[in-house]
Image (spheres, rainbow, N blue to C red):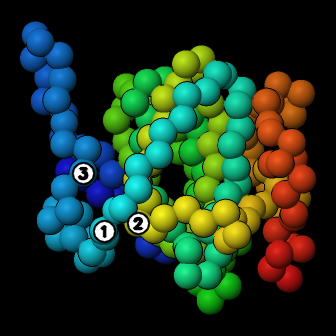
Amino acid sequence: MGIEETNLKDCYLITPKVFADDRGTFFESFNKKQFLKLTGLSIDFVQDNQSLSQKGVLRGLHFQTGDFGQAKLVRVITGSVLDVAVDVRPESKTFGQHFSMVLSAQNNKQLYIPRGFAHGFLVLEDHTIFSYKCDNYYNKASESGIIFNDQTLQIDWGFSESELIISEKDKELPTFETLFK
């Protein structure tokens, strides 16, 4: 497993070692001992989530607040996404900054997103299966988010707004400035 630091503090890009032969491929998608050795972080994932989406679906930017904050390890099983993490920890040196990366079934890359980050993704191919592990259980009363087209964050999703498929709930999320200024 290879781990690279992103421009955001505590947020890591993970590349598993893929073994391929005439039967196909195999890789270890997570190894707690290796993760601890390479990052110094001891993570106990308690919930796995998965979604199936079509091209143009944008989910996010979501996060859980307070005691229900969640660290996530995200990856794509089939298809591809533009994955985005935003540091929303006011005390962090990278507060208000974001990192984006294409995650796909072809590159097998994963993104570790620590607690205190908003997260979202844009689906780039039809029939994309997105999977993520969480280190805390979902709590509806603690959910929050930032509008996808926030002017402060200036995230380039690579699609025009007319091409995006967004839930009504996500269209009504507050701005970064409303939440943090």
| Residue 36 image point, x, y percent | 21, 70
Q: Position of residue 69 (x, y in %)?
A: 55, 73
Q: In front: mark 3 or mark 1?
A: 1
In the rendered image, which residue does mark 2 sit on?
135
Question: Where is residue 107 shown, x and y percent of the image?
Answer: 37, 32
Within-10-Å neighbours for mark 1: few <14, some 14–19, many 20+? few
Q: Residues within 10 Å of mark 3 (few under 14, many from 20)?
A: some
SS category of the residue bearing label 3: loop
Few, some or many C-alpha atoms within 10 Å of disc 2 (few <14, some 14-19, many ≥20)?
Answer: some
The residue drawn where x is 80% and y is 37% is 166
In the rendered structure, which amino acid carries the disc numbered 3? Answer: Phe
CA gap, disc 3 to disc 1?
11 Å
Quadrant holding the C terminus: bottom right
Residue at numbered disc 3: 30
Is residue 148 left or right of 72 when viewed as pictured?
A: right
Residue at 70 percent across and 54 percent down: it is 61
In the image, residue 180 sits, relative to residue 3, either above or below, namely below
Verify CB contact (< 8 Å) between mark 1 and mark 2: yes
Badge 1 is on which residue? 44
In the displayed structure, would residue 60 be above or below residue 9? above
Q: Quadrant of residue 76?
A: top left
Amino acid beneath label 1: Asp
Q: Earlier in the sequence, mark 2 or mark 3?
A: 3
